[in-house]
Image (cartoon, rainbow, N blue to C red):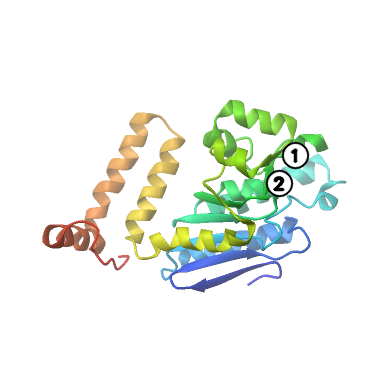
Amino acid sequence: MGDFVRVAAEAGYATIRLERPPMNALNAQVQAEIAAAAVQVSDDPAIRAVVIYGGERVFAAGADIKEMEQASYATMAADSRRLQESFTAVARIGKPVVAAITGYALGGGLELALCADFRVVGQGARVGQPEILLGVIPGAGGTQRLPRLIGPARAKDIVFTGRFVGAAEALAIGLVDKVVPDAEVYQAARDLVARYVGGPSVALRAAKQAIDEGLDTDLDTGLEIERLHFAGLFATEDQRTGMRSFVENGPGKATFAGR
């Protein structure tokens, strides 16, 4: 557990909680603690799904600008690598991950949320990539993960203008997956991950890897990635349990061990 990021586990899922008031600015220490939290939840077999949460008022308002204001090119060439690596650690958590977004998710805050598989936002939430207003561009995945999610034209609009996007528009363009009252964001995210807690965790990890890795390559290579994961799952206990249960009891009744 770090100074600004903590992991709380219960009932098969974990919450990665950002706690750097007032706006959860993502300075170097927070970035390192996010990466450590991602490794922790990835390595714990008792954790089947993950929620990333910034609290009731804000998800994360972005990088710590005071920390970067006087940085040189040489400094940022190294620091930006560490920033990307910390967020990539979240994207590579081999379990379903949901970002629970209240208030602002801007700049690095939105880029962190883009590393999740799903995004639940409050009605009053605002998301965006305002880096252009500072004379720079997104540096933690915004120019790459955002267009892959919502398409290049919509991503360029958000990145080029630096404007804030409201919850309704974010839902309409596929940037987020669910909008709920602000006070219900965390519970809605918990409800979403609950469906995965009792699932076949090895197959879920394989499905996530196949989709994510396939998106970064051509169709033929993606199909080969899928085929290898598919065949490999026939070495798992969950495959035998799931197919036996289907034959004997019908679909959707298996109890998986996660092995």
Q: Secondary structure at mark 2?
A: strand
- Residue 70: image x %, image y %? 88, 46
Q: Residue furthest right?
A: 70
Q: Amino acid at mark 1?
A: Pro
Q: Residue furthest front?
A: 181
Q: 15 above or below 151? A: below
- Residue 149: image x %, image y %? 53, 37
From the viewer's perspective, tell me whether residue 125 is left or right of residue 114. Answer: right
Q: 106 above or below 97? A: above
Q: Nearer the viewer, residue 156 or 203?
A: 156
Q: Which mark is residue 130?
A: 1
Residue for point 50% across, 65% down: 41
Location of residue 205 by image quarter: bottom left
User: Which residue is tagged 2?
Assistant: 106
- Structural distance between the alpha carbons of marks 1 and 2: 7 Å
Residue for point 73% across, 59% down: 24
Location of residue 138 by image quarter: top right
Q: Does residue 116 appear anywhere in the picture? A: no
Q: 109 above or below 50? A: above
Task: For label 2, count other residues whose C-alpha is less than 10 Å away and answer few (under 14), some (14-19) or many (20+).
Answer: many
From the viewer's perspective, tell me whether residue 244 is left or right of residue 226. Answer: left
Residue for point 38% across, 44% down: 210
Q: Nearer the viewer, residue 151 or 32?
A: 151
Count of marks, rendered view: 2
Q: Does residue 242 appear anywhere in the picture? A: yes
Q: Nearer the viewer, residue 46 or 29?
A: 46
Residue for point 62% across, 65% down: 17
Q: Nearer the viewer, residue 37 or 16?
A: 16
Q: Amino acid at mark 2?
A: Leu
If the image is split into quadrants, where does the N terminus sit? bottom right
If the image is split into quadrants, where does the C terminus sit? bottom left
